[in-house]
Amino acid sequence: MSTPATYTAESILESLGYPDPMIAARQQARMILLGRLAHYQTAVRQLEKKWGVALEQMRQKYEQEGKEDFEADDDYLQWQWCADAIQTIQAQLDALQ
């Protein structure tokens, strides 16, 4: 009867081509961040298509006094949040380099 193989996280990572666990962790973090980046970039493109303007023009519309447009306001806030998230993710990706 053969003895079952003993595995460690390090031996598994090494067999997958990652001699250093930190390299594997960086690669995994990068893949997660790239997925999030794609999600937020898609959301921004959808809002740009919906409104036919860039974020800056939407901001001007949002800041106009005396004009209430709840849908535009909600979309602007979501749009700004996504733009901020994109900047954060890009900074995190830069830090992982």
Image: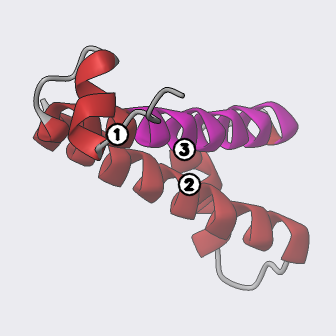
Question: How many neighbours does mark 2 have within 10 angstroms: few (below 14), some (14-19), or many (20 or more)?
Answer: some
Q: Main secondary structure of the magenta part?
A: helix
x and y percentages locating residue 67 in the rendered image = 79, 78
Q: Which mark is residue 36?
A: 3
Dot 1 falls on a residue whose secondary structure is loop
**Residue 11 is a magenta residue:** no
Q: Quadrant of the C terminus?
A: top left
Q: Which mark is residue 82?
A: 2
Residue at image point 54% right, 60% down: 80
- Which mark is first along the chain, 1 or 3? 1
Q: Which mark is residue 7?
A: 1
Residue at image point 60% right, 37% down: 54
Dot 2 falls on a residue whose secondary structure is helix
Looking at the rendering, the stretch of residues picked out in magenta corresponds to 31-50
- Which mark is first along the chain, 3 or 2? 3
Dot 3 falls on a residue whose secondary structure is helix
Question: How many neighbours does mark 1 have within 10 angstroms: few (below 14), some (14-19), or many (20 or more)?
Answer: few
Dot 3 amino acid type: Arg
Task: Tell which of 33 and 65 is nearer to you.
Answer: 33
Question: How many neighbours does mark 3 have within 10 angstroms: few (below 14), some (14-19), or many (20 or more)?
Answer: some
Task: Tell which of 16 and 23 is nearer to you.
Answer: 16
* 14 w.r.t. 73: above or below: above
Q: CA distance from mark 2 to mark 3?
A: 10 Å
Quarter of the figure with residue 74? bottom right
x and y percentages locating residue 90 in the rendered image = 30, 40
Q: CA distance from mark 1 to mark 2?
A: 41 Å
**Residue 43 is a magenta residue:** yes
- Residue 25 seen: yes
